[in-house]
Image: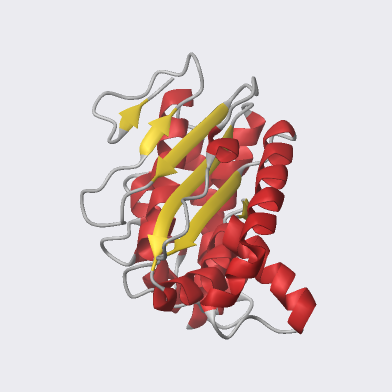
Amino acid sequence: MGNSDWTFSTLAEVWEYRNGTIVAGGERLDALPEPERQRSLADLSARVRAQLAQCDDGWLVSVAWVMVEDLYKSFFRGFVWTPGVHDYIAATAPVVVDELSRRGFTVNYVVDAVQPDENLAVMLEYLPGVFEAAGLAVIGPQLAAVEFLKREEGHPPANMAAIQRYRDDGHALASELITQWHQERRSSAYFNLDRDDELPALSVDAALARDGVPGMIIVFRELPPAEGSEAVLSPPEGVVLPPGMPGRQKN
């Protein structure tokens, strides 16, 4: 693979979920021998970094919005978790997170979704790795509950109903951690992946709170990741987004 193979006309193409770009990039990387693979990864990161350098703050915030959304939507479109997919994400998304940090911003992705147990088990197992590879700290009530159960039983829960034993404790820990990460100016992903049952909905207020922290980009999704669905984008105060930016702006 030559360097010219990593060509993107826009940064949005780097994670384009409609085309399965992340999985395709992972497959290409997995087909490479070392050290050609490492050279290709370095080139991929360099290309993202070069395009980011041309973005003003409004465009950078827009890129962050697209990135987290496409990472999430890609998960529901023939996604596979391979070494190449991990490395593709790790070579591209953290470059955005680093540039945000350099300019005094963080991106905080919040998903509030009710899931049937068969979806929930897969999401809790694999979704955190996607966003951790992207350079984000990851937490959520159900993720915390799974960790509590692992400590109790020594293995992940075989039945998703078991996580309800630690639902409240998981929610409390997730709220505590996300508040701490906001204050520490860490980019994060908060997933409230509640079971489809009769229990009252859990609040995501802590994840959505700015608490006077400057430079915080909040992307909030409560709709299923269907074609055309939108997450609410709340850019930092004073940042002007490009015309035609998808999503809704809330300052």
- Pick out the residue farthest to the left: 228
Horizontally, is 170 left or right of 89 in the view?
A: right
Horizontally, is 171 left or right of 11 in the view?
A: right
The correct choice, above or below, for 197 with respect to 188 in the image is below
Horizontally, is 28 left or right of 128 in the view?
A: left
Location of the C terminus by quadrant is top left
- In this view, the residue in front, 147 or 104, is 147
Residue 37: in sight, yes or no? yes
- In this view, the residue in front, 180 or 100, is 180
Q: Residue at x 41, y 78 (%)?
A: 118
Total numbered labels: 0
Q: Position of residue 180 (x, y in %)?
A: 74, 39
- In this view, the residue in front, 168 or 148, is 168
Q: Position of residue 55 (x, y in %)?
A: 45, 30
Location of the N terminus by quadrant is bottom left
Instruction: Please identify the quarter of the rendering in which residue 240 is found.
Output: top left
The correct choice, above or below, for 19 with respect to 61 in the image is below
Q: Position of residue 115 (x, y in %)?
A: 40, 65
Q: Residue at x 54, y 82 (%)?
A: 159
Q: Residue at x 46, y 18 (%)?
A: 239
Q: Residue at x 43, y 48 (%)?
A: 67
